[in-house]
Image (cartoon, helix red, strand yellow):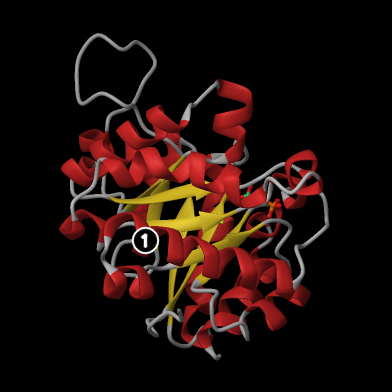
Amino acid sequence: MTQQHLPALVIGNWKMNGSLTANTALLESLRRDIASFGHVNVSVCPPFPYLAHSVALLAKSPISCTAQNLCHEAVGAYTGEVSASMLADVGCRYVLAGHSERRGLFGDSSERVAAKARQALNAGLTPIVCVGETLAQREIGLTEATLAAQLLPTLAGLSIADLEKVVLAYEPVWAIGTGHVATAQQITSVLRYLRQLVADTTGADKVARAMPVLYGGSVNPTSAVWLAQLPEVSGVLVGGAALKAEDFSEICRSFGQR
Ligand code: PGA
């Protein structure tokens, strides 16, 4: 099962980094470089307090904003949480759900990730649902079972029309922030598996084929060159390298000119 060809999606996940000054410099640099990117869909994920500021700085530019997380409920007494409708209100286009740091450090279960994806869709945001196995799970042959367990609760709550608005991101936990990019063979095999899982679970073959599936984990300008050549890879979710304007621009160019 191969994907249909849309412009690649390159997302820069800033995680808990940045300041008004640093974000302004980074976004101004990206705005200067954008003409060189080519045909690519670029988005950045600032921390919550900076979203509105980043959206304003990116006004009239094709670069969008993605939130890093959202609440699994729509509104109410959830101190410290941020709802999907608030994110849409300040101008976000996408939101991450189930990043491995949320799952591992903050206890986001796969059921909670499913609820977050549901809230995102209800508010008109595109959820980027992240899945990935640990090294221990890979080493004992549990990669596919782990990914299925992470994704099936989300798939269970979605109609075919919803599915058309979902992006998946495969981020092996062992590749995040480690400098160890998964191999082309590992990525291709998992991305094919994920599309097949979506098709088998939902019966929506065409939607599964067209579904954008990103790779994330230690992507840098060097690996982006070969990652952009893999037909199954619809784009990348970039962490560390997204904080360096030159590196992030180079990654965008690799995908924009593939
Ligand atoms: P990394 O992070 O590129 O620094 O490995 C990726 C991510 O966590 O999304």
Q: Is residue 128 above or below residue 40?
A: above
Q: Residue at x 73, y 41 (%)?
A: 137
Q: How many marks?
A: 1
Q: Residue at x 61, y 34 (%)?
A: 101
Nearest the viewer among 251 and 61 is 251
Q: Residue at x 63, y 86 (%)?
A: 229
Q: Is residue 250 above or below residue 177?
A: below
Nearest the viewer among 214 and 203 is 203
- Screen quadrant of the C terminus: bottom right
- Screen quadrant of the N terminus: bottom left
Q: Amino acid at mark 1?
A: Asp
Q: Residue 222: x, y in percent?
A: 78, 76
- Does the residue tagged 1 have its C-beta within 8 Å of any atom of ligand 1? no
Q: Residue at x 39, y 28 (%)?
A: 112
For disc 1, the neighbor class at 10 Å (few under 14, some 14 to 19, many from 20) is: few
Q: Is residue 52 visible?
A: no
Q: Residue 165: x, y in percent?
A: 26, 59
- Which quarter of the picture shows residue 90? top left
Left or right: 122 in relation to 127: left
Q: Residue 252: x, y in percent?
A: 56, 76
Q: Residue 56: x, y in percent?
A: 33, 53
Q: Which residue is mark 1?
A: 200
Q: Secondary structure at mark 1?
A: helix
Q: Is residue 89 visible?
A: yes
